[in-house]
Amino acid sequence: MDIFNSTNNRLIEKGFESIDLVEIENLGAVTYRSSINYVVMKKIHNHQELKSIKSYAAEVRNILLSQKINIWNAYLFFCVSEDINYETFFMVERDTKSLRKYVIRNNLDLDRIPFIDNHIGYKKIDPNVTTDSEENPYLTRIFDFITTHNGRQNKFSATEVEASIKMIIDMVDKRYES
């Protein structure tokens, strides 16, 4: 099933209803609402459309404001094919100007959207796995490096990537020397 249709079905299943907003339909999108949230969903057909997402989001935001819809509870869903570059969709979602955005490539992407509240398919985390990774001195040093260099918020520069690789190589070398 096409991801656009699958997302439509999932929203309906979760209590969203489709509403008619002519201005948004003219932009090639569909609007849904629940008791709290609004979702504007558009299918992206090619990479060229990805380049205009910022202006598209601003236009949708203005339409929602003109309809007196609370934009703080409004989201843009972009349904795309799975061949989209991970970094591209990450950058789309990180840009929260105009409206918050989600790139939907498959059904797993729908599971990470908090307000859809789909707990079906979530696996319980094994606490032993977490404990093992926390006790691993190599992983601890790598996580510390990422945290120290603000890697959770920013993309590493080439210099920072080289420094992290050097750190890992040095750790492995010391292990083999022991």
Image (cartoon, rainbow, N blue to C red):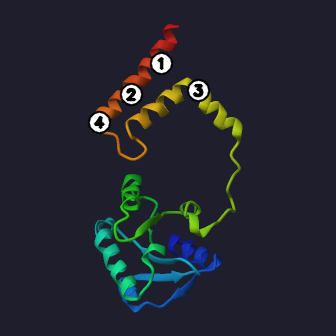
Numbered disc 2: secondary structure: helix
- Front residue of 100/56: it is 100
Numbered disc 4: secondary structure: helix
Amino acid of disc 4: Ala
Left or right of 85, for residue 118: right
Q: Quadrant of residue 131?
A: top right
Give the Cα separation between the discs numbered 4 and 1. Answer: 21 Å
Task: Please say if 51 is above or below 15.
Answer: above
Amino acid of disc 1: Val
**Residue matched to label 4:** 158
**Upstream in sequence: badge 4 or badge 3:** 3
Q: Quadrant of residue 66?
A: bottom left
Query: What number is the disc on residue 136?
Result: 3
Give the Cα separation between the discs numbered 2 and 3. Answer: 17 Å
Mark 3: few/some/many CA within 10 Å (<14, 14-19, 20+): few
Amino acid of disc 2: Ile
Q: Residue at x 37, y 23 (%)?
A: 166
**Residue matched to label 1:** 172
**Upstream in sequence: badge 4 or badge 2:** 4
- Front residue of 80/170: it is 170
Task: Please say if 87 is above or below 150.
Answer: below
Give the percent coordinates (x, y) of residue 5: 54, 76
Query: What number is the disc on residue 165?
Result: 2
